[in-house]
Amino acid sequence: MNNTPKEGKSSKKKDSKFVKKIKQKIYAWHRIIGIITIIPVIFWTLSGLMHPFMAHFFKPTIENEFLAAKPIDKSQLTLSIQEVLQKNKIAEFKNFRIVSFDNSTYYQVKTTKDELIYFNTSDAKKLENGDQKYAHWLSRYFLDDQKSTIFKTEILTEFTSQYKYVNRYLPVYKTTFNRPDAMEVYVETASSKLATFNPKSRQAFIWFFDTFHNWAFIDWISNNSIRIVVMILFLSIIFFSAISGIVIYGLFWKQFRKTDSLNPKKGVRKYHRQIGIWVSLFTLTFAFSGAYHATTKWEPYTLDKMAFEPVFETKDIQTPNNALALDWNRLENTSIIALNDSIYYRCQLALAKNKKYNKPKKDSKSKWGKKENPKSEILYVNAATNKVVPNLDMEYAKFLAYYFSDGGPKAACCEMDDVTTEKTSLEEAKLLETKVLTEFNSREYGFVNKRLPVIKLAFDTPEKTTYFIETATSRLASVTEKSDIIEGYSFAIFHKFLFMDWAGKNIRDLTMVLAALIVLVVSLLGLILFLKK
């Protein structure tokens, strides 16, 4: 009588043939897909390990990150922009601004052919090869190096393997210096901005990261679409490898524990199981967020082309720029814009002494971690009446948002009368929020967007469309929708460990390094097990 219940009890412990078969298949597939993905995992984890080290712990430095804005010396503007253009027989142009370098002041004029040419503000003489000379001056200023010779100068009109799209600015000058560190400095002369800088050590890192993390080597033999498909395929396999590991060592752990008590497993197998179950979460988050992020790379980068650049006729600019009715002691620069069938001077002025502003804070998300330029006051002066028009910067930002929402740039970008009548569905949407951003914010408008200051315009659309407009250059700095925000948070939280920001960037990056290192160790232990078999 005592044997019957025991047999019943023992029979409950035994798995059916079907369940055993399923377990065997899961275990077999875990080994197979683990071997398939071992090389990609090594590529991704090693290059991932290098990123926080190079981008944070061993980041390069440069003496000056920004060209400090200074008030214009009105006495230097002997001739107005109209007089200079007329003397040089230029009837049409796209824009102008004022730059000072090598003890001289120039009008930097953008022609209808998108060339930047320089004219002395005192005698209207053209500076030969002026744009390259200004690029060299900027590069030396940012580097604070007036002695090293320049080895090579290039104009980049598209992104390259060393100058990635994350740098945003185009076109740029790449100036390579003849120094032990082979420093490369990238500058945008149209805005006097430093795009990026790469010493020899960073050049090597960029190549390594681009090759083994972004898999640029696939681009060399095929195209971007195939690269993305292959990456998503391998990331999906890695994801399922982690899932199968959790099933085997988590859900079926009792069976393995029973087996181990009869035939204890030591060494590699033991550590592979014990460590693997704990790091499987990191593997899942890395693989999922990486694949999700890769899906956003289908479309080519076009923000560098999103600029509103109407053509102005010199004769239409009635008020001389050196006779504007404003505080010349604070005027830092001037450009020109078209809005509502009128022409305006866009004037950047230093804040008046009686106006307070918060000193720029150190941006923890900045590539270099230094300070931004102080805030400025923006005024618009009607070129016909020489009168200041209040609050026009926000109106101009709205106009640009409507223009870009219609898919700009387009042929009409060169016809002022046409572009001002463009109507899009975005104009029907309610404007939920407007804000001037003078500092980067990782949760709203991060350092990766590069351009500042910008105006944020959030619209009440089903996609929650938000535009970030740089009115200084009439450019679209960024546009986000609900899907972009979800993907951005996915990548920031699960791939870049944004959830660790509370502990500081050092601890966050250290956590990322440890997570990637442990994933690599578990994968290598699995490979050793396979080879032993």
Image: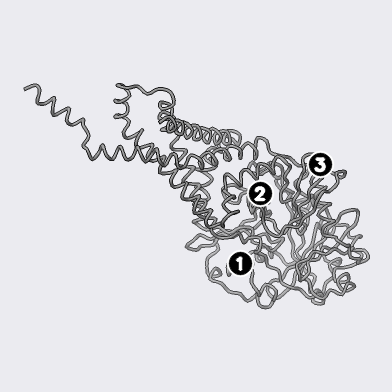
Dot 3 alpha-carbon crowd within 10 angstroms: few under 14, some 14 to 19, many 20 or more: some
- Mark 1–mark 2 Cα distance, whole angstroms, equals 23 Å
On the rendered structure, is 209 left or right of 330? left
Give percent across and percent down for residue 109.
81, 66
Q: Quadrant of the N terminus?
A: top left
Instruction: Determine contact: label 3, label 1, CB under 8 Å.
Output: no
Is the residue marked by circle 1 packed among few (<14), some (14-19), or many (20+) residues within 10 Å?
many
Quarter holding the C terminus is top left
Provide the residue designation for mark 2: 439
Residue under the image location 55 percent in, 41 percent down: 43
Would you identify the image quadrant in which residue 391 lies? bottom right
Q: Are marks 1 and 2 in contact (CB under 8 Å)?
A: no
Q: Nearer the viewer, residue 92 or 274?
A: 274
Q: Residue at x 53, y 71 (%)?
A: 425
Q: Which residue is mark 1?
A: 404
| Residue bearing the label numbered 3 | 179
